[in-house]
Image (cartoon, rainbow, N blue to C red):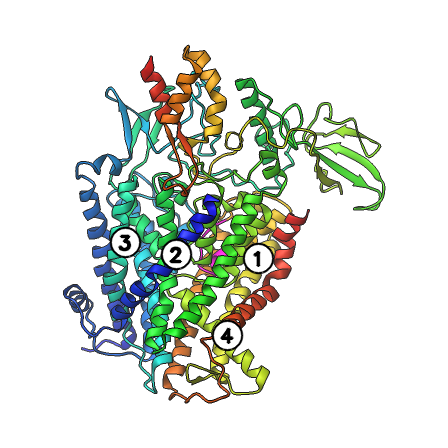
Amino acid sequence: MRLPAWLGQHLAALRALLVLTVLLGLAYPLAFVALGRVPGLDGKADGSLITVGDKTVGSSLIGQAYTDADGNPVPKYFQSRPSAAGDGYDPTATSAGNLGPESVVDTLSDDPEVASQSLLTQVCERSLAVGKLEGVDGSRPYCTPDGVGAVLAVFYRDGLTGPVTRAVSVNQTGDPFVQTYAGVTVEPAKNGEDYQALGGVITPIRGNAPSSPAVPADAVTASGSGLDPNISPAYAELQAPRIARERGFTEARVRQLIEEHTDGRALGFLGEPAVNVLQLNLALDGEQ
Amino acid sequence: MAGWIFVITLVIALIAVYRPFGDYLYRVVTGKRNNVVERGVYRLVGVDPATEQTWGVYARSVLAFSAVSILFLFMFLRLQDKLWLSLGMPNMNSHVSWNTAVSFVSNTNWQAYAGESALGHLVQMAGLAVQNFVSAAVGIAVAVALIRGFASRGRSELGNFWVDLTRITVRVLLPVAAIAALIFMIGGVVQNLSGGTDGTTLTGAAQHITGGPVATQEAIKLLGTNGGGFYNTNSAHPFENPATWTNWIQIFLILLIPFSLPRVFGRMVGQNRQGYAIVAVMAVLAITSTALTVGFELHGAGTVPQAVGAAMEGKDVRFGIPDSAAFAAATTLTSTGAVNSFHDSYTALGGMMPMVNMMLGEAAPGGTGSGLYGLLILAIITVFVAGLMVGRTPEYLGKKIGAREMKLASSYFLITPALVLIGTAAAFATGNNSTALNVGPHGLSEVLYAFTSASNNNGSAFGGITVNTPWWDTALGLAMLLGRFLPMVLVLALAGSLARQKATPESEGTLPTHQPLFVGLVVGVTVVLVALTFLPALALGPIAEGLS
């Protein structure tokens, strides 16, 4: 019996798919799973796990949060970057923040389900918190002193032009960060109000914060993976005095440990210098 | 500075492998002998490797294979909870399964799910990763069939799809992927079948360290310009891309095959300089675009990057800004769509570049195979435009570009813009744009990016949009399906039409297609076509955002 051509073709396709599935989908990956059992490679194939005593404390490639049960930083540890993976550094829910460069207006509400922070406010709030923890100035451009995005909705008489008729500090329900804008008294925002929809022009205000803030960029931004195992050497340096104080080490000793756990650029040009936070914190624990 | 050296070393490495790797590919697709594995495959499949196919049979084989693949993968995803190694994951619902099946078969790897919380190991390695191999091989096969059309001297056969599929898989993709998988394992990429390890962090919290056969899938994800990550955060995840140097190798793998295929083209049409001209077009566009992307990100314009002091949101420390931006450029210049940083949080113009790259039709250098045939279509359009200027019948490589060829080429070019613009308009008209995380111009960018990515079979995303609703899954699935297979059928029809022509001898009036003038013309035609098509949409999205 001869099959019709179209059916023959689909049968050939099915057979090809099955043969290739066995080769590419089973033989190939399973051979490498077996190869991953070879001593020397097995640790990496299993996820570069670190055990202290008989306890797995994490992976040298996966970052973790050094916070207590309430989410507050544990001061004797170097702190990681902000993370958008689950509740922070959750490998079963990896994610980035995904807010854009002009995400500057918060949704204000009494209902925590509805309220949401813009990326700008997240950055300002983190900067203020890190500044407070490390005893440095946490101010940044486009941030208010109370740690939200310094953004006005400015209303003009003729829409986009003409004299200013009204100005609202959109991220603040309390006292606005500036008294007046172009001669008009700045109002605080009301919950649930969308000033952009009312015709306000969203205007971020630079302020006079230094353009290179004391708190480094990686300390106030969420990573891509949500599991970033590293911080920048600048952020590690910022934390060194606190660690020394909390643990009774000399700052020089802490700096030496930072250096030991810093990977420079591979071959001098690949990537950026990075400090492995878990290994550094383990080294600190090992000293005591 | 280090960032620029990073880009330059990649360029040098690709130049170094162009001839040897291209020649190897050439021998694979033109060789007469079949090795023992290949003969075994032919026997099991039941095809005669010596039979050649006309364009119609070739196209029907491609479509049959892809249709069976979609159905197989769909069933696999729907039944995963009944199979081994599912790690207790439930089956995938029908609209996400449809979307995912089309996505992987069409070489798009758009992901409406998060790997670590939706899929078990078996479906990843025996379902998705298999398509990573074969969808790449299908793309290369179609490109080779088009070249055979150019090289043919009046015979209408274009080769045998089953032979091309098998050889490209067995002799090119599998060995290179195996080497890359080993290198990745040395770098720290995981490769196991474990459901994960429970750890207790230094401050006493629980952390579940995930496992999986990642290294083998990672290798083909990049080599085959697929891009579908094992985990949700793709190549940003330290278990997929653990080190600064693995990042370099990942970008190299993405670009390896697309940049080497013009060598195959040059050799098969018997003039290496034709291959050089095509690769020059790709290089001009790719280097310009990469430099702009890196430059925009380093400059860090925009309110939030200014407040932060650098465009670090969505980027990991080890890669830093320039190496992340270089990855973004490579992944969208090809049809890969893997990401090592999140494009949604890029500066307005830095985030526009990946979109522009995809709109270029991903022909510079484009996906495995699809990039080459995309660029050859653009070359045909260029020859036609140049022919109109001087009033001669356009010819390319001795083949007359007549009415039939031009109809096929222009239809090819129109498919993706139609899908992107109609899709975006439909999302807004039906209110489905409301699932975007951002509002205003950035919200438009997110929707536009989604359809651009799907229609061009890229698969990268402006992450801030929720796409696993039935509407989005269906719409993007259709965009991926049509954006992949309609162009393929047109390319094969074009190949058939070229193959039947006898070669026309060159005359004084023939436009030389291997000189800088032609390279410049193709670049110009490409940029003008894309600008005319997409500028209005871009002006309302990223450009409006960048100017505000």
Q: Is residue B261 left or right of residue B487?
A: left
* Image quadrant in which you'd find residue A277: top left
Amino acid type, mark 4: Phe
Q: Which residue is mark 2?
A: B12
Residue count near mark 3 (Cα–Cα under 10 Å), binned few <14, some 14–19, many ≥20? many
Looking at the picture, how far across and down is residue B133, in whole percent?
Answer: 30, 58
Residue in the image at 47% along x and 48% along y: B4
Task: Say whether mark 4 and mark 1 are on the same chain.
Answer: yes
Amino acid type, mark 1: Thr
Q: Which residue is mark 4?
A: B518
Amino acid type, mark 3: Ala
- Marks 3/4: CA–CA distance: 35 Å
Of residue A141 and residue A270, the one placed in the foreground of this image is A270
Looking at the picture, how far across and down is residue B495, in whole percent?
Answer: 39, 78
Residue contact at pointers 2 and 3, CB within 8 angstroms:
no
Residue contact at pointers 3 and 4, CB within 8 angstroms:
no
Amino acid type, mark 2: Ile
Residue B457 falls inside the magenta stretch: yes
Task: Say whether mark 4 and mark 3 are on the same chain.
Answer: yes
Magenta: predominant secondary structure element?
loop
Q: Which residue is mark 1?
A: B424
Residue in the image at 41% along x and 89% along y: B505
Of residue B270 and residue B503, the one placed in the foreground of this image is B270
Name the element at disc 4: helix
Name the element at disc 3: helix
**Residue span colored magenta:** B453-461
